[in-house]
Image (tube, helix red, strand yellow):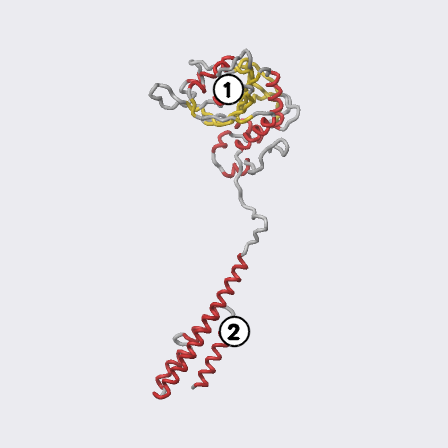
Amino acid sequence: MTETLDQLRDDFLANVEAAEDLAALEELRVSALGKKGGISKQMQGLGKLPPEERKEAGQALNAVKTAVAEAIESKKLVLEEAALDSRLAEESIDVSLPIRPETEGRLHPITQTIDEAIAILGEMGFAVAEGPEIEDDFHNFTALNIPPEHPARQMHDTFYLPKKENGSRMVLRTHTSPVQIRTMLSEEPPLRIIAPGRTYRCDSDMTHTPMFHQIEGLVIDKSTHFGHLKGCLLNFMSAFFEVDDLPLRFRPSFFPFTEPSAEADIGCSREGGELKIGGSGDWMEILGCGMVHPNVLRACDIDPEEYQGFAFGLGVERMAMLKYGIPDLRTFFDGDLRWLKHYGFVPLEAPSLVRGLS
């Protein structure tokens, strides 16, 4: 009996040592210690032995069972550690490798257009100024020499907020010109600023939206004249559309806040039904401009006998549509990721005149 148990123990221990993975070890445990395992069968046969042999055989069999169980547990720890090392090796990441290419967001054409305009005008010495989108009557209308009966003040053209206790009403700004007023009231001339931002008007169709973006420019000093305005706009338009010798003309117009006032047109061609900026044969209106009205200067406590300046304003969406061939204004605000992937721009590539605008 003893020799048989020693042989059984040695066989199981050899098999435990030879097990290559946890699955093989579990199979071996069942064959040795399971209900139908080799050691279990030996335990069941103890009842057939004479009483004097049963005790000794039982002790020997328990010793074999304990030795095999301990060997299996030790081998299990070794195999688990090996399996973990293998898994870690397979799942390890080399942090020195370049990042994996992933889908990244895109800058909206409006954002790109504003950044390009800021880059160009920034090189020309303009600083960016900002202001609130909810304005009072003084900054949005009165200080800009807009009379009380002007259509822009009417409910059908402007978003008014509910009346205050004193009867006054705030308004969603109809242009970014209030930023110019706030700058002239808070800073001493000379001034050279641009004011990009959202504006609001009661208008909605294929070419207008209730919310749109503007960029307005303002220069105030003692010697600025209309020739400077022309040179500024010519340089800006040529750089923005990336067209040398861009044709530019001015047509007399009227704006309450400038005198004289003008609308600027750029040359274009429409041959074959295709619009080409910088061509000849046709003109396209691009922005409004003029010399700052003396009444506007007086409203900002600036002496018009000593200072003068020019201002201009352009629509960001229109500039983006012309430069990037976007046919429908409404698609700017659809939130379509496919559209944004097509017309959007890679982030972190800030436009500059050195690196390139787009």
**Secondary structure of the residue carrying numbered label 2:** helix
- Viewer-nearest residue: 357 or 269: 357
- Viewer-nearest residue: 224 or 318: 224
Q: Residue at x 47, y 69 (%)?
A: 76
10 Å crowding of disc 1: few (<14), some (14-19), many (20+): many
Pointer 1: what residue? 184
**Secondary structure of the residue carrying numbered label 1:** helix
Q: With respect to residue 212, does 145 lie above or below? A: above
10 Å crowding of disc 2: few (<14), some (14-19), many (20+): few
Q: Quadrant of residue 167?
A: top left
Q: With respect to residue 147, does 358 lie above or below? A: below
Does label 1 or label 2 sit earlier along the sequence? Answer: 2
Whether residue 255 appears in this view of the structure is no
Taking the view exactly as shown, the residue that stands out farthest to the top is 305
Q: Quadrant of residue 349?
A: top right
Pointer 2: what residue? 18
The percent coordinates of residue 141 (x first, y second) are 45, 18
For the C terminus, the image quarter is top right
Amino acid carrying label 2: it is: Ala
The percent coordinates of residue 53 (x first, y second) are 37, 87
Q: Quadrant of residue 58?
A: bottom left
